[in-house]
Image: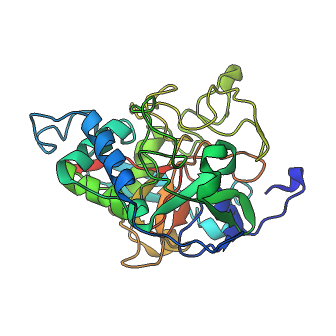
C-alpha cells in the first residue's frame, strides 16, 4: 500500500496504479469533454514511417520464429505464492500447487519497438490505441508538448493521464518518438494487439503457468527470478521505481522509464526482464480463484472472463504500494487497455 506516503488505496486502485484500464476507469476531465477518436492522417503517416524505419525482412516471421527463443523442457514446478503478507488477496496468488507443463519455446526478451514495427509494416496494422485515439501515460513523462492533448487524470490514481495521440510509436503522445528506443519493449499495446502480433509471428502468448515457469528460471519458490534478495550485495537486478512514488524516481537502477529489453542479467533460463520494466500480457483470462479451480496439467485458466492476466511488474512498481515485481505476483486488465508500461513476449509450441 501507499501508507508510507500517506495514501490509502483499494485493491482495485492498486491494480490501476500499476496500469490503468480503458473501460473500467473514468477520467477526471478538465475543460472540454474529450473522447477517443480515430488517429488523424498525420499520426497514421508517422506510424508508417516508424514501421518503415525497421526495414523489410527477406524472410517471413514464421521462418525466423525460433530466433531469440529459448527451449524449455517442461516438467513440474511449484506455481503460486502461499504467503499472504507478500501480495494482495484480490490477486489470487495462491494456493501453491504443483503444475506440469509440456516443452515449449519462449522469447528471451519482450517484443521490441523494432520487432513490432516490422509487424506493422508487413500487415499495415493499426493498434487499438490508434483506433481509440488515446492511451495512458504516466504523469512524470508529460511535457508542455502534450498539454493540449491531455484528456484528464484517472480517478483515485492521478499519476495516470489519458493522452490523445499516445501510441506505440509516440509513447508520451504527440511530440515524442521511439527513435532512440528501438531496442526497448513496445508499449501501448493491448492484449488484442499482442495476440495479433503473435499470430503473425507464428507464435502465441504464454499461459500464466508457462510464464511463471519460465520466469522462475529453475529456482523453486523464490521471491524473484534470481533469489530472495531484491538487491543482492547492493546490485540492482531489475528496472523498478526507485525513490518516493509517484513524486521522485532517483534512477538508482539506471532507468526512469523503459530499459532496453536485454538490460540487467538474465535468469537461470536466459530470460531478460521478467521482473520490472514492463507488464507482460499472458493468454489467460484472469480469476482470483483460478489456482484453486484449474487443472494442474498444462493449465490454461478460465474459459472466459472480463480481464486478461498480466505478469512481471513494471518500471512503476515499488515495494511501498505494489510489490508486484515478485515472480508469483499477478495483475490484470481489460483486453482493450493500453498504457506506457504494458508489453509482451511470445512463446511457441515445441
Location of residue 102 in the rendering, given as x and y in whole percent from the top left corner = 26, 53
| Foreground of the two, 146 or 320 | 146
Location of residue 136 in the rendering, given as x and y in whole percent from the top left corner = 57, 58
| Foreground of the two, 160 or 287 | 160
Which image quarter is the N terminus in?
bottom right
Residue 311 shows in the view: yes
Seen at 50% across and 25% down, the residue is 265
Seen at 46% across and 39% down, the residue is 177
Quadrant assignment, res 195:
bottom left
Is 246 on the left or on the right of 337, as rendered? right
Quadrant assignment, res 255:
top right
Q: Is residue 284 above or below residue 67?
A: below
The color scheme shown is rainbow
Residue 202 shows in the view: no
Q: Is residue 264 above or below residue 249?
A: above
Location of residue 32 in the rendering, given as x and y in whole percent from the top left corner = 65, 72
Seen at 40% across and 61% down, the residue is 39
Amino acid at each position: 500500500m501507499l501508507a508510507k506516503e500517506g495514501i490509502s488505496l483499494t485493491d482495485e486502485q492498486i491494480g490501476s496504479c500499476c496500469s490503468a484500464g480503458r473501460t473500467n476507469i473514468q477520467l477526471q476531465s478538465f475543460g472540454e469533454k474529450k473522447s477517443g477518436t480515430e488517429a488523424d492522417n498525420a499520426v497514421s503517416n508517422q506510424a508508417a514511417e516508424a514501421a518503415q524505419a525497421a526495414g523489410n525482412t527477406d524472410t517471413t516471421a514464421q521462418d525466423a520464429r525460433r530466433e531469440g527463443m529459448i527451449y524449455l523442457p517442461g516438467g513440474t514446478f511449484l506455481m503460486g505464492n502461499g504467503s499472504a503478507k507478500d501480495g494482495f488477496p484480490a490477486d489470487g496468488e495462491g494456493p501453491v500447487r504443483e503444475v506440469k507443463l509440456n516443452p515449449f519455446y519462449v522469447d528471451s526478451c519482450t517484443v521490441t519497438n523494432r520487432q513490432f514495427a516490422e509487424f506493422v509494416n508487413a500487415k499495415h496494422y493499426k493498434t487499438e490505441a490508434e483506433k481509440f485515439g488515446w492511451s495512458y501515460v504516466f504523469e512524470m513523462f508529460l511535457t508542455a508538448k502534450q498539454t493540449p492533448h491531455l484528456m484528464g487524470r484517472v480517478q483515485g490514481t492521478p499519476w495516470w493521464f489519458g493522452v490523445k495521440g499516445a501510441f506505440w510509436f509516440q509513447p508520451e503522445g504527440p511530440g515524442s518518438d521511439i527513435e532512440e528506443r528501438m531496442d526497448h519493449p513496445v508499449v501501448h499495446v493491448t492484449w488484442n494487439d499482442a495476440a495479433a502480433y503473435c499470430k503473425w509471428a507464428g507464435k502465441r502468448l504464454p499461459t500464466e503457468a508457462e510464464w511463471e515457469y519460465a520466469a522462475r528460471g529453475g529456482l523453486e519458490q523464490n521471491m524473484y527470478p534470481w533469489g530472495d534478495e531484491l538487491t543482492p550485495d547492493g546490485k540492482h537486478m531489475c528496472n523498478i521505481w526507485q525513490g518516493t512514488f509517484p513524486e521522485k524516481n532517483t534512477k538508482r537502477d539506471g532507468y526512469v522509464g523503459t530499459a532496453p529489453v536485454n538490460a540487467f542479467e538474465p535468469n537461470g533460463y536466459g530470460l531478460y526482464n521478467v521482473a520490472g520494466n514492463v507488464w507482460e500480457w499472458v493468454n489467460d483470462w484472469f480469476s482470483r480463484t483460478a489456482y484453486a479451480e484449474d487443472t494442474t496439467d498444462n493449465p490454461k485458466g478460465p474459459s472466459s472472463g472480463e480481464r486478461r492476466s498480466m505478469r512481471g511488474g513494471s518500471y512503476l512498481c515499488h515495494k511501498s504500494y505494489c510489490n508486484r515485481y515478485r515472480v508469483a505476483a499477478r495483475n490484470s486488465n481489460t483486453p482493450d487497455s493500453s498504457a506506457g508500461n504494458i508489453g509482451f513476449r511470445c512463446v511457441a509450441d515445441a
